[in-house]
Image: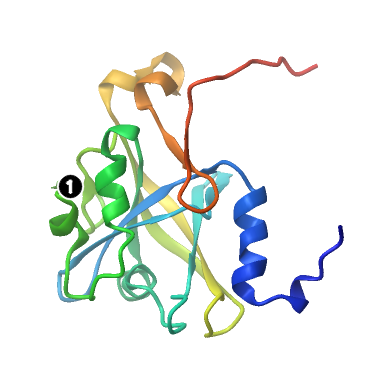
């Protein structure tokens, strides 16, 4: 089957991304607006960019209902700072609560019951329940698709501080994946656990 994405409504084309690019890690992004209101939201368009300087990126799509910018994007545009918290299965439920479209003056920390913890370098707090946090300063925002529903902003951030729970920090800077218990996004309402791994040595 061959599909021309330009011939599809954006929601239908989006399903091919969600159904094929699997599993997707979750960037649980904490930010703060200029008035001090905390925001917390999960994004599964998320990956590493570079090691020097240590850089990661997230893609924040515009709201599907009206094409407006999401609070996370507006906050990062205004303050140039954010934190990416890695999601473990132990707080998957509260994380899911934050995916709701709350008004800008409502803090998802309050709605989910998750705990804000002070960051070291940036103003937005970390999620205390998360075992790995990346404090980031904005490097660049790349707008893709304009200002309509389905468009997105690629947010590239330089990591300026890393927090790793002592229990999962192994010698040599390695991470204990079983201790981290990360979850990933699949399509629709489905998630995945990291419960089965295998090794292949590069030639």
x and y percentages locating residue 85 in the rendered image:
34, 45
Residue occupying image coordinates x 28% and y 33% = 90
The quadrant of the image that shows the N terminus is bottom right
Disc 1 element: loop
x and y percentages locating residue 37 in the rendered image:
16, 69
Residue occupying image coordinates x 67% and y 49% = 20
Left or right position of 2 against 198: right
In terms of depth relative to the viewer, which is nearer, 192 or 135?
192
Q: In this rendering, does residue 117 appear at all?
A: no
Name the residue beneath numbered marker 1: 114
Q: Quadrant of residue 93?
A: top left
From the viewer's perspective, is residue 16 above or below residue 184?
below
Mark 1: few, some, or many residues within 10 Å (few <14, many ≥20)? Answer: some
Left or right position of 187 against 36: right
From the viewer's perspective, is residue 198 above or below residue 89?
above
x and y percentages locating residue 117 in the rendered image:
16, 46
Q: Residue furthest right?
A: 2
Left or right position of 2 against 10: right
Left or right position of 184 against 117: right
Residue occupying image coordinates x 39% and y 16% = 170
Residue occupying image coordinates x 31% and y 71% = 75
């Amino acid at each position: 089957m061959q599909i021309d994405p330009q011939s599809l409504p954006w929601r239908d084309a989006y399903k091919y991304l969600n159904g094929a690019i699997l599993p997707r890690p979750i960037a649980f992004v904490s930010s703060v607006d200029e008035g001090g209101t905390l925001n917390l939201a999960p994004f599964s368009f998320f990956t590493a960019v570079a090691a020097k300087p240590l850089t990661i990126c997230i893609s924040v799509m515009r709201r599907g209902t009206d094409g407006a910018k999401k609070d996370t994007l507006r906050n990062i545009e205004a303050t140039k700072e954010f934190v990416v918290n890695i999601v473990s299965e132990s707080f998957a439920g509260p994380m899911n609560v934050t995916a709701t479209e709350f008004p800008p003056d409502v803090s998802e920390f309050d709605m989910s019951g998750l705990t804000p913890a002070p960051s070291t370098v940036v103003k937005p707090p970390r999620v205390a329940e998360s075992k790995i946090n990346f404090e980031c300063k904005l490097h660049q925002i790349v707008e893709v698709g304009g200002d309509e529903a389905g468009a997105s902003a690629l947010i590239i951030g330089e990591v300026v501080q890393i927090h790793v729970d002592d229990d999962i920090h192994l010698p040599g800077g390695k991470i204990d994946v079983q201790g981290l218990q990360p979850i990933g996004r699949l399509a629709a309402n489905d998630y995945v656990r990291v419960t089965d791994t295998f090794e292949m040595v590069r030639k």
